[in-house]
Image (cartoon, rainbow, N blue to C red):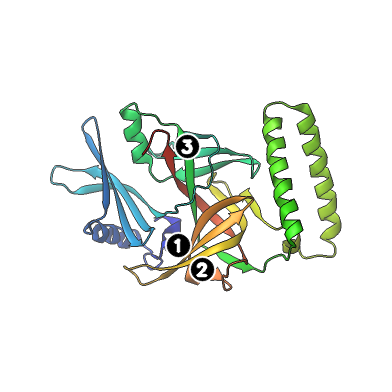
Amino acid sequence: MHKFLRSAGFSEYQSKQEIQELLKKLLEESGETLRFQINSERLCQVWIEAAPGLGICIVGEEKENQELEVEYYFPYLTGEEITSTAECSIQRHTERETYAGLLDEYKVGISLIFYISNSIEYRMRRQKRENCQVKGAHLCGFSVKGKILLPIQKTAVQIEQSKMASRTRSSLLEAAKNGDADAIDTLTIEDIDLYSQVTRRVQKEDLYSIIDSCFMPCGIECDQYSVIGEIKHIEYKENRFTGEKVYDLTLESCDLTFHVGINEKDLTGEPKVGRRFKGQIWMQGTVDFKGQE
């Protein structure tokens, strides 16, 4: 079963047989459906909503009797905010014809990889030879374990200085990628200074009073990250199939805004706007294409 199914409020489904029964039940619902013909195969992607913007996506081949032979499924979460407009390339996974997006996002200083949830739309556009260039990505994540941290008190001046420093670092990273030797030297010196400051402060201060936000790869799978982000908005959703409660947290981490879904029972602490969320997430997202209405 999908590890993050519980994050969408389906924690009671533990075995393969239970999952198959769940998918069969969900397919009886009238969900948003996208059909795609390739050679003799008729692929079908069905979005079954368990709560507004939250549910399970099922992909499979539609047979002559209109039954769907399920190939794979995954939980999904949607958000209206565009997380990034950075250059994005799309790569196919090895195991099956699903796709990953790779964002050259200078704000986090890494190539941000995420699972593309509207991959069937991408395949349709590619087959029709339409524009497949990405103009923006709406990122959302799922977590199976998280905790709430208290905020770091900052003055208005400190907040503005932090934003300016972030913009400056993004510019330096872009210049360094283009081969600017001065930018590379400046970033190296900044990293040495930062390491020195953290080493001194960690002897007298708590680690999470030093680290304001964090966005870094975690584990061996390339689309999972360890994040610390400030909570900007909280939405409480109830799975209409199971009655389980799910938090939809809008986070800001390293100047990126994205959503994180987590089961109420998997979150330690009380989430409030201004506090911080810490946890490991599986990142997914939908992409907008250039020329798309």
Which of the numbered marks, if any, corresponds to residue 7?
A: 1
Secondary element at tag 2: helix
Q: Nearer the viewer, residue 290 or 109?
A: 290
Which of disc 3 and disc 2 is earlier in sequence? 3
Mark number displayed over residue 234: none
The mark that comes first in sequence, 3 or 1, is: 1
Residue located 59% across and 55% down the image: 252
| Quadrant into which the N terminus falls | bottom left
Q: Which mark is residue 266?
A: 2
Q: Residues within 10 Å of mark 2 (few under 14, many from 20)?
A: some
Instruction: Assess whether mark 3 and mark 2 are in contact (beta carbons under 8 angstroms).
Output: no
Q: Is residue 254 above or below residue 263?
A: above
Q: Cα distance, mark 2 to mark 3?
A: 34 Å
In the image, residue 225 lies at what x, y percent?
58, 51
Q: Amino acid at mark 1?
A: Ser
Instruction: Tell me the mark number nearer the camera, choosing from 2 and 3.
Output: 3
How crowded pointer 3 is (Cα within 10 Å; few <14, some 14-19, many 20+) is rated as: some
Would you say 205 lies left or right of 25 here?
A: right
Q: Secondary structure at mark 3?
A: strand
Q: Is residue 53 left or right of residue 40?
A: right
Residue at x 67%, y 30% (from the top left corner)? 177
Whole-percent x and y of residue 69? Answer: 24, 47
Q: Amino acid at mark 3?
A: Lys
| Image marks 2 and 1: residues in contact by CB distance under 8 Å | yes
Which residue position is annotated with label 3? 135
Amino acid at pointer 2: Asp
Splitting the image into 4 quarters, where does residue 173 fall? top right
Secondary element type, mark 1: helix
